[in-house]
Image: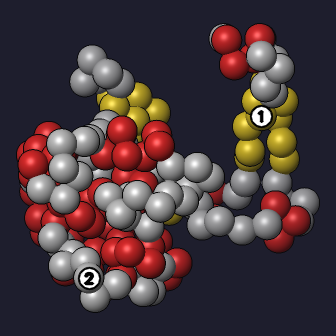
Amino acid sequence: SSRRAAGEAFRLALFPAEAAEPATWDGIFNVVRETFPEAAPKVLARAGELRALPFAELQARATAGYLRGASYFEVNEAAMAGASEDSRYLSTARLASEQCEGRVEEVRGWLYHVLGLSDLFDGAGSTVLPDGRRGVGEFLIRNRRVADFGEAFAWVELTP
């Protein structure tokens, strides 16, 4: 890849299965409850809508509304290291603030920006290939120090 040619190295993190949460809507809501208590009320209030509404509809609402013509992707790409001065980038603090109503399209933007749930995430627990076919199972893991896993963790260097 061009990134590897530019000198970037890639590695795979292996950790115990019990440390992971399935990448389903239930798994997402568990992680939100435990890891983002300040955002949890607004996210959990929209759980039914998040499960039911297709990404394209939420993206369209957001683009016509608070994103002012941009997409989640475009706003996310402009952020640096998970932070942005752009008010359209919904950090945890912005979502949790009183100024944010917590509309479903805003909550989906936060999930896109903070948890990395792209347009291909549908809550089924497996990757979705661009052609719509199902790929491998997906899992979530809460951010934690690698050292906290002790001997039950390994890095695998990925070579071309």
Q: How is the image coloured?
A: secondary structure
Mark 2 nearby-residue class (10 Å; few <14, some 14–19, many ≥20): few
At 23% from the left and 52% from the top, the residue drawn is 67
Identify the image quadrant of residue 99. Answer: bottom left
Q: Name the amino acid type tagged 1.
A: Arg
Q: From what the image shows, is residue 133 above or below residue 18?
A: above
At 15% from the left and 70% from the top, the residue drawn is 103
Mark 1 nearby-residue class (10 Å; few <14, some 14–19, many ≥20): few
Give the CA distance from mark 2 to mark 1: 40 Å
Q: Which residue is mark 1?
A: 11
Residue 58 can be seen, yes or no: no
Q: Secondary structure at mark 2?
A: loop
Residue 89 position, x and y percent, is: 38, 58
Q: From what the image shows, is residue 100 above or below residue 1?
A: below
Image quadrant where one finds the N terminus: top right
Residue 22 position, x and y percent, is: 45, 57
Q: Secondary structure at mark 1?
A: strand
Residue 56 position, x and y percent, is: 14, 40
Q: Which residue is mark 2?
A: 99
Q: Nearer the viewer, mark 2 or mark 1?
A: 2
Q: Is 144 in front, or is 18?
A: 144
Q: From what the image shows, is residue 58 above or below residue 49?
A: above
Q: Name the amino acid type tagged 2.
A: Gln
At 69% from the left and 19% from the top, the residue drawn is 3
Image quadrant where one finds the C terminus: top right
